[in-house]
Amino acid sequence: MGAKHPVRTTEKTLALIEELMRRGPSGVTELAQDLDMGKSAVHNHLTTLQDHGYVLKTGDQYQPGLKFLEVGGSIRKSMKLYQVAEPEVKALADETGELTNLLVEEQGLGVYLMRSKGEDAVDLDTYAGLRTHLHTTALGKAILAHLPEPRVEDIIEQHGLERETPRSIGSREELFDALEAVRDRGYAIDDGERLAGLRCIAAPVKDASDDVLGAVSVSSPATRISDESLHGELSERVLSAANVIELNINY
């Protein structure tokens, strides 16, 4: 639900920030053209952001500054889930040798809080702060499976069910069948649904009231994870890590 009285100046500033994130270093003229804004207005927004450390200027090019990292890092550090989960996510990466992840849901999207790379981990496009659709990842499905059904319906309405690969879930019926399977076995699987050739397994992290807080996962090239491992040793390790995080949060 949007603001009843959105502030246009704020919306323009945010649009500039997002465009800088998308484009990388950019000049006033190209930003003004892309956003259909006057060059003077773009310059005023950028210099104001620069004065506060949110934008850097090199020559005639502007780019986001590390002030955003300070804000995000401070928010993450204050989250109890992150504080408790960080050592377990790192330990899981060391044990498996693979890439491990911690994800939470915010405004209907998944947000990666952290990732940790084991000795054999692949380097993916994920990073702390990246937002992703929930239905395309094991992490997201582990969370969706433990949200109230009306909330899941709202998320579908808000963000849709676009397929990111041919293996992605693309319909409401398919999603709800998948979420029921997650609840039955206790963990979720992503078999090339966000990135072709990648398999992931994730388990939810819940609080003492059984509300889902987030999810932890292991990701690996499909060639390295057999079905036997996926549903055996690896699922046990992920479930164990999630259980330890839950115990430390709740008790």
Image (tube, helix red, strand yellow):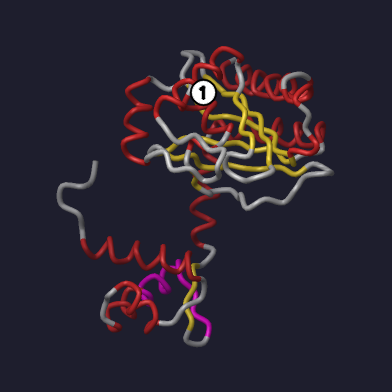
Q: Position of residue 15 (x, y in %)?
A: 34, 64
Q: Mark 1: few, some, or many residues within 10 Å (few <14, many ≥20)?
A: many
Q: Residue at x 64, y 34 (%)?
A: 191
Q: Is residue 108 magenta?
A: no
Front-lying residue, 80 or 225: 225
Residue 249: name its quadrant.
top right
Residue 160 pos. (x, y %): 37, 40
Residue that appears at 51% across and 23% down? 178
| Residue segment shown in magenta | 46-58
Q: Is residue 7 above or below residue 30?
A: above
Instruction: Locate residue 183, reporting x and y percent.
Output: 54, 15
Q: Residue sitting at 71 percent across and 19 percent down?
A: 240
The C terminus sits in image quarter: top right
Q: Is residue 241 left or right of residue 136?
A: right
Say which residue label 1 marks.
Answer: 178
For mark 1, give the secondary structure.
Answer: helix
Q: Amino acid at mark 1?
A: Ala
Vertical relation: 26 (above or below) 206: below
